[in-house]
Image (cartoon, helix red, strand yellow):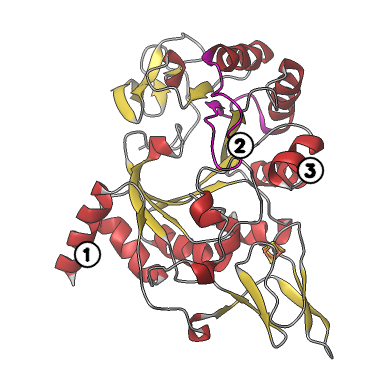
Amino acid sequence: MKKKFFVLSIILNLIFVLPVFTKNKSDSFLKKALWWQLVDEKQKIIQCELCPRECILQPNQSGYCTARINKDGTLYTLTYNKPVSLAVDPIEKKPVFHMLPGTKSFSLATAGCNLRCIHCQNWEISQRPPQTIQSYNFTAEQIVKMAKESGARSISYTYTEPVIFYEYMLDIAKLAKKEGLKNVMVTSGYINTPPLEELVKYIDVFRVDLKGFSEEFYKKLALGKLQPVLETLKFVKQRNSFVEIINLIIPTLNDNPDEIKKLCLWVKENLGDETPIFFSRFYPMHKLTNLPPTPVATLEQAHKIAKDIGLKYVYIGNVPGHPYENTFCPKCNNIVIGRIGYSITQNNLKNGKCKFCGYKIVGIWE
Ligand code: SF4
């Protein structure tokens, strides 16, 4: 058994995202979902309460995310134990820069999503119903075992929207925590507060995609709403979980300096000036192919806006080799963690502090 997992770990290390195949497609693999209620007992109509869409589902109807189904008046998740992508990634790839730099993160996704981003980079798995994609069949125990054997220090729920595989993520995260692994949720934050309240006990880092700062943008680009994402961010912060934010800047759609300024001010006022924020470069993708990649100058302008406002840890993403991939000490301005792409080039942290001036750098360190 051990040999089998060792071989699998090697494969996972070699392949970026591995689509895999099993024959498990029958209802016998359904698991009863959490967070729903029967709103009409006679007609067996359900309301899902997991995310802000709060879908009303007739019998045999799936939710907007395609990952939950009403079967005879009971809501089931279609993604439990069914990852479609597994990989061992550098934690820098999430990107998460303030937790265990230079370590590996065992990463997984199931199919489906509760948003419809027209620029989604993983649309082949996020925008397809779970029943239409062949998957692994791995229990939470097996995932944690593989993660440990791969040498990863954390498990990342990523690539698609982990909210839609909530039950699977929760069970893995509970076990992972017991085994000394960290949990990282790479999310758009589109989740209701009660389920989040349960999850927040187990997730060490929420890497939240704050896509823009207007309801109009969220509606147009993701068919979602901004306000629930802001509520998620505030809630997670109140519970003292660590948050890192990414804002993908798309030319002409969300690159207005005034909007970026508003976003940064909101982050500072609601999450604090020590919240790491990434301005990431857009590349044409999925249904959004008529726009060019974001000019680096636009990202640098956003970086300046954030720094001028007083945010302490501001990064530029998707531009390998850019100086703003580094973590600079907010006090002495020396590089405390140097990076090129996903590689760590220097680590000048000592007990979580800048080794040059002793300033405490926010994060989860050794
Ligand atoms: S999780 Fe899925 S089924 Fe539930 S409310 Fe959200 S989109 Fe609808």
**Can residue 150 be seen by looking at this rendering?**
yes
Q: Position of residue 188 (x, y in %)?
A: 62, 46
Q: Which mark is residue 227?
A: 3
Q: Nearer the viewer, mark 2 or mark 1?
A: 2
> How crowded is the residue under tag 1: few (<14 C-alpha within 10 Å), some, or many (20+)?
some
Instruction: Give the residue number, with chain letter if any, for mark 2.
Output: 288
N-terminal-most mark, 1 or 3 = 1
Secondary-structure class at tag 1: helix
Query: Magenta residues?
Result: 271-296
N-terminal-most mark, 2 or 1 = 1
Instruction: Give the residue number, with chain letter if any, for mark 1.
Output: 5
The amino acid at mark 2 is Leu
Secondary-structure class at tag 2: loop
Q: Quadrant of residue 349?
A: top left
Secondary-structure class at tag 3: helix
Quadrant location, the C terminus? top left
